[in-house]
Image (spheres, rainbow, N blue to C red):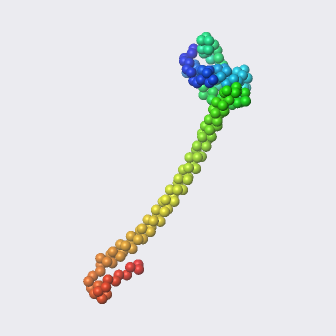
Amino acid sequence: MEIKGCKTLARINDVAIQLVENNGEKWVPVKPICDALGVDFSAQRQRIERDKLLSSTVGMITTVAADEKEREMFCISFKFVFGWLFTIDTDRVKEEAQEAVVKYQLQCYNALYDYFTSRSEFVEQKQIEIDRQLEVVETAKAHFSDAKNVLSKAESRLKQLRNLTMDDFDMEHRQLKINFAE
């Protein structure tokens, strides 16, 4: 198989993890990751091959090995490498890599939680904001209704004042009396 490109994806415990492009697909060799983590490559390969889903995402890809020679390497699809790493038993990882693996697995748990709960959190937050805004609208309506009543009474009184004549004033013995009880 022809190698289209090989890039360093990451470094784990000073081991370069390569990303290999082959026929337009991205692959990651499994052995260097196992070596870097201190887990048994043969056991991981068997685990991957027994897994119904992961077994369909692996293949032998020709790549450049550490000794600069072309070799066929057992690779996993780049798309699935993160899920495979998530399943590694941290008790089987060498001690100096355990903290990094646990941290990575925690990030995976958080990513899964965020993915599966973000929709319900959005709906919940949206409903809280809708309820809050409904209170504002109801308060504004009540204030508007009160203001409308005050305005109506003020306009009525203003109309009465404008309609007062000197004769009305004289009839009230020169005292300005207006019925504001309305």
User: Does residue 104 sit above or below 25 in this rendering?
Assistant: below
Q: Quadrant of residue 65?
A: top right
Instruction: Using the image as rendered, state which of residue 57 and residue 82 is in the foreground.
Output: 82
Q: Quadrant of the N terminus?
A: top right
- Image position of 142 (left or right of 82): left
Q: Quadrant of residue 105?
A: top right
Residue plotted at (27% across, 85% down): 167
Residue plotted at (67% across, 27% down): 96
Residue plotted at (56% across, 21% down): 8
Residue 45 image point, x, y percent: 70, 22
- Image position of 21 (left or right of 35): left
Query: Across the whole image, how many numbered discs are drawn on residues?
Result: 0
Is residue 56 visible in the rendered structure shown here? Answer: no
Residue 42 image point, x, y percent: 72, 20
The single residue placed furthest to the left in the displayed view is: 166
The single residue placed furthest to the front in the displayed view is: 96
Instruction: Using the image as rendered, state which of residue 136 and residue 10 is in the foreground.
Output: 10
- Image position of 58 (left or right of 138): right
Residue 110 image point, x, y percent: 62, 38
User: Does residue 11 sit above or below 155 in this rendering?
Assistant: above
The single residue placed furthest to the top in the displayed view is: 69
Instruction: Using the image as rendered, state which of residue 108 and residue 154 is in the foreground.
Output: 108
Instruction: Using the image as rendered, state which of residue 68 and residue 29 is in the foreground.
Output: 68
Residue 164 image point, x, y percent: 29, 80
Q: Quadrant of the C terminus?
A: bottom left
Residue plotted at (62% across, 17% down): 61
Is residue 175 visible in the rendered structure shown here? Answer: yes
User: Does residue 173 sit above or below 4 in this rendering?
Assistant: below
